[in-house]
Image (spheres, rainbow, N blue to C red):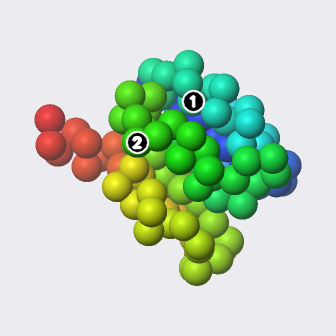
Amino acid sequence: MKKILLVEDDLFLRDIYTEVLTDEKFIVEKAVDGEEALQKIKQGNWDMVLMDIVMPKVNGIEVLRQINGNSRKYARHIVMMTNSDVVDGLEEVKGMIDGCLLKTSFTPGEFVNKIKQYFKNEQAVS
């Protein structure tokens, strides 16, 4: 079973994403802001960190800056999520992430299929 750290400050979205991912047999741990995300990311051994960009305390871009290019040390995949297709600072961290999902573009089912695609691509390479 794949272990995902879901970092989302919106309770409604956090609950929906947790439900659809859990239904697909992912193990989901949650963080509600960037500070909590940093603590949990540094525990390592994540198959994926799925992180909102705009969050209280520390935003997702700053979280990546603080792990200072060592994202692969903590997680096999890092995928950012956003509500906007224009994000300041995303170019700076592009090499640290596997992708960015526009949350408003997907139904919950499509969202989980996008997440599963990252793992399918991983298996094809192995």
What amino acid is found at the position of numbered circle 1 in the picture? Ile
Label placed on residue 62 = none
The reply to whether residue 115 is visible in this rendering is no
Q: Is residue 69 left or right of residue 61?
A: left
Label 2: state its secondary structure. loop
**Mark toward the start of the polypeptide (2 vs 1):** 1
Q: Nearer the viewer, residue 48 or 41?
A: 41
Tell us which disc is closer to us: 2 or 1.
Answer: 2
Q: Is residue 24 above or below residue 27?
A: below
- Would you name the residue on which mark 1 appears? 41
What amino acid is labelled 2 in the image? Gly
Whole-number angstrom distance, CA of label 2 to CA of label 1: 13 Å
Choose between 69 and 31: the one closer to the eye: 69
Who is closer to the viewer here, 69 or 122? 69
Does dot 1 land on a helix, a strand or a loop? Answer: helix
Task: Name the residue at 50% across, 66% down.
Answer: 90
- Residue 42, located in which quarter of the rendered image? top right
- Residue 93, picture quadrant: bottom left
Where is residue 25 shown, x and y percent of the image?
53, 31
Residue 52 percent across, percent down from the top left? 65, 55
Image quarter (top left, top right, bottom left or bottom right) of the N terminus: top left
Q: Report how many numbered discs are placed on residues in the image.
A: 2
Which residue is situated farthest in the bottom direction here?
86
The numbered disc on residue 69 is: 2
